[in-house]
């Protein structure tokens, strides 16, 4: 049986691989978990011994088939719990991550499958992240980001790359929430910042970094 810490490392590695399209480095893991690189290295060696990951210094981390299966199951539980907390208990999307971090360690597969059925088998969580099904399959976003939406185009916010609490709080304050319509009014050559229109409100300027982290379902007028 894996410890909570080992499970959290596997989920963190999955998150990085999901965003980086294939690998995760020791430094990236350390930053995300908020610990030191030597501590991460010790854990990676332990997970490698348990045949959950393939780890070679300076070459990044990859999952074994068994490790990927465990990570997908943890991600499935986490994202289903987040969906339940938002849709059925009325939590805000910036409030649910830490609660789901605790609930994801519940071992009952029957419980999470019943919860999935109760929610109508959602494919994405409240942040727009894909939810693996009971067989470990998941559907990735095929949508563009605000950064590459294009001048004078618009669409609906359908997901996020960055789901950190600081970023979520920024989005809530700015009115950038799931389902909100967004249009690109101007792109600033100097720094890549983008002037956007949110719904029918006054224009808002967002940095290129913000724009790269918000998925948009492009619509035609």
Image: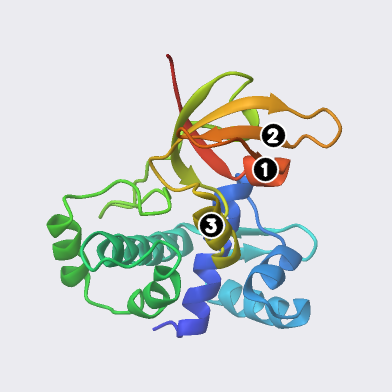
Q: Which image quadrant is residue 34 in?
A: bottom right
Q: Would you say 113 lies left or right of 152 here?
A: left
Q: Residue at x 57, y 54 (%)?
A: 162
Q: CA distance from mark 3 to mark 1?
A: 13 Å
Q: Are marks 2 and 3 in contact (CB under 8 Å)?
A: no
- The mark that comes first in sequence, 1 or 2, is 2
Q: Which mark is residue 194?
A: 2
Q: Residue at x 50, y 46 (%)?
A: 176
Along the line of sight, the residue nearer the viewer: 135 or 143: 143
Q: Position of residue 31 (x, y in %)?
A: 71, 69
Q: Are marks 1 and 2 in contact (CB under 8 Å)?
A: yes
Q: Would you say 134 lies left or right of 66 here?
A: left
Pointer 1: what residue?
Answer: 206
User: Of discs 2 and 3, which sits in the foreground?
Assistant: 3
Q: Residue at x 54, y 53 (%)?
A: 171
Q: Would you say 54 lies left or right of 87 here?
A: right
The answer to whether 219 is drawn above or below residue 94 in the figure is above
Q: Would you say 145 lies left or right of 111 here?
A: right
Q: Label 2's element?
A: strand
């Amino acid at each position: 049986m894996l410890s909570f810490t080992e499970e959290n490392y596997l989920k963190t590695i999955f998150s990085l691989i999901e965003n980086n399209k294939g690998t995760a480095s020791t430094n990236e893991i350390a930053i995300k978990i908020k610990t030191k690189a030597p501590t991460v290295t010790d854990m990676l060696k332990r997970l490698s011994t348990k045949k959950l990951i393939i780890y070679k210094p300076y070459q990044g981390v990859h999952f074994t088939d068994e490790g990927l299966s465990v990570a997908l199951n943890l991600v499935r539980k986490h994202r289903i719990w987040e969906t339940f907390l938002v849709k059925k208990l009325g939590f805000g999307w910036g409030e649910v991550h830490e609660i789901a971090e605790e609930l994801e360690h519940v071992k009952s597969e029957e419980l999470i499958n019943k919860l999935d059925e109760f929610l109508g088998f959602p494919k994405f969580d409240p942040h727009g992240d894909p939810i693996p099904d009971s067989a470990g399959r998941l559907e990735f976003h095929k949508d563009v980001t605000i950064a590459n939406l294009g001048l004078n185009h618009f669409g609906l916010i359908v997901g996020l790359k960055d789901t950190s609490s600081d970023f979520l709080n920024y989005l809530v304050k700015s009115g950038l929430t799931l389902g909100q319509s967004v249009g690109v009014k101007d792109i600033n050559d100097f720094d890549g910042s983008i002037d956007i229109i949110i719904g029918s409100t006054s224009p808002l300027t967002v940095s290129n970094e913000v724009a790269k982290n918000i998925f948009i379902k492009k619509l035609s007028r």
